[in-house]
Amino acid sequence: ANGYYFSRWNKCIHSSHDLSDMVYIDNYIFNKDVFIQYNSTVGQFVGYTELGVHNAELWNKDPNKQQEMTAQLEGYCKHNAEIRQTAIADKT
C-alpha cells in the first residue's frame, strides 16, 4: 500500500501492410506517471519530470542508447509484426 511503483511499457504501432509506418514507443512510468518516453518518430527521449528531463538529456547524447532504440524498432517491432501478420492477417 505505501510504496513506490515503477514500470516500463513499450509498444509497436503500425497500420500499413508493409510496416513502413511502424512506430516504437517506450514509456518509463513511476507511480502511474510517465516520466520519460522514447518515440521512434521523434527519434529521441523526452522527459516529463525533472528526473525525466535529466535522463533524456543524458540518453539522447549516448549513441549506444540511440542505437539500442533503433534496434528495438527493427528487431523487436518489425520482426514480431511480420510473424503476426503472416500468421493472422495474410489468411484468406
Image (cartoon, helix red, strand yellow):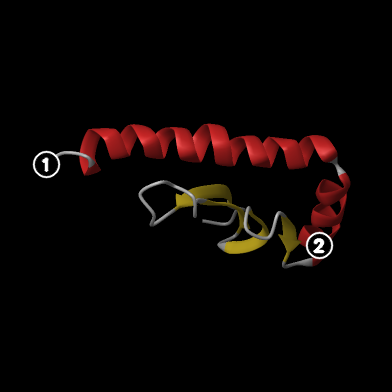
- Residue type, numbered disc 2: Val
Image location of residue 81, percent across then percent down: 39, 40
Q: Is residue 86 above or below residue 56?
A: above
Q: Which residue is mark 2?
A: 53
User: Dot 1: within a 10 Å radius of its alpha carbon, few (fewer than 14), some, or many (20 or more) residues?
Assistant: few
Q: Which numbered dot is residue 23?
A: none
Q: Which residue is mark 1?
A: 92
Q: Viewer-proximal residue, 6 or 55? A: 55
- Residue type, numbered disc 1: Thr
User: Quadrant of the rendered structure where residue 67 is?
Assistant: top right
Marker count (numbered) = 2
Q: Viewer-proximal residue, 90 or 87? A: 90
Residue at 88% x, 47% y: name it.
Answer: 61
Q: CA distance from mark 1 to mark 2?
A: 48 Å
Q: Nearer the viewer, mark 1 or mark 2?
A: 1
Image location of residue 30, percent across then percent down: 63, 57
Image location of residue 9, percent across then percent down: 53, 49
Q: Which of the marked residues, 1 or 2, is nearer the chain's N terminus?
A: 2
What SS does tag 2 mark? helix
Residue at 67% x, 41% y: name it.
Answer: 69
Compared across the picture, whether 74 is left or right of 88 comes to: right
Q: Is residue 9 above or below residue 65?
A: below
Compared across the picture, whether 83 is left or right of 71 comes to: left
Residue at 41% x, 46% y: name it.
Answer: 18
What SS does tag 1 mark? loop
Q: Quadrant of the C terminus?
A: top left
Image location of residue 19, percent across then percent down: 44, 47
